[in-house]
Image (cartoon, rainbow, N blue to C red):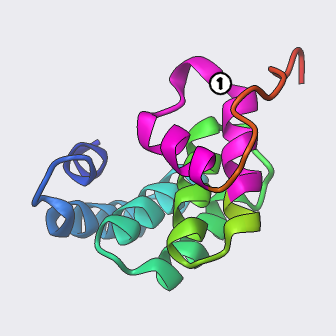
Amino acid sequence: ELASFYADQPNRATEALDFAKKDLEVRKDIEGYDMLAWALYRNNQFAEAASAVAEAMKLGTEEPGFYYHAGMIHDALGQPDKARKFLEHALKISPHMFPDDAKKTLARLGGDLNVQVACGS
């Protein structure tokens, strides 16, 4: 939880990455990989972040945060098609919990901000 908190705080990205790495040593699960991916992203380590988020998503869990993180990571890597796909899926899963930076990124990528909400998926 500290990794998540620090990842979203200005100037705390290094601490977030340290906590995420320690957490992943203890629990190698999809949430741990997602947090590592987000902390790596916040530290501008985009290629490593993409590998970690791929691990987080390998089970296909419909967690909007995973798709949001994947979209932002792939945008940072200059992969607009992948980024748009992931962000649109995050929005479809949970439109009410879609962060403002994701909305701005999706709009910049020409994505659909009016995707249909998934029902009973």
Image side of residue 51 versus residue 2, left or right: right
Based on the displayed image, in which of its 4 quarters is residue 79 positioned? bottom right
As rendered, which of 81 and 7 lies closer to the eye? 81
Image side of residue 67 versus residue 76, left or right: right
Q: The N terminus is located in which quarter?
A: top left
| Residue stretch in magenta | 84-108
Q: Residue at x 13, y 53 (%)?
A: 10
Percent of width and height locating residue 80: 68, 67
Percent of width and height locating residue 39: 34, 63
Q: Residue at x 34, y 60 (%)?
A: 23
Q: Residue at x 63, y 59 (%)?
A: 56
How many C-alpha atoms fall within 10 Å of the one at disc 1: few (<14), some, or many (≥20)? Answer: some
Q: Measured along the vertical axis of the image, is residue 119 above or below residue 57?
A: above
Q: Residue at x 13, y 58 (%)?
A: 12
Image side of residue 100 versus residue 77, left or right: left
Q: Is residue 90 magenta?
A: yes
Residue on which the image places disc 1: 94
Secondary structure under tag 1 reads loop
Percent of width and height locating residue 115: 80, 29
Amino acid on which the number 1 mark rests in the picture: Ser
Report the magenta stretch's main SS: helix
Q: The C terminus is located in which quarter?
A: top right
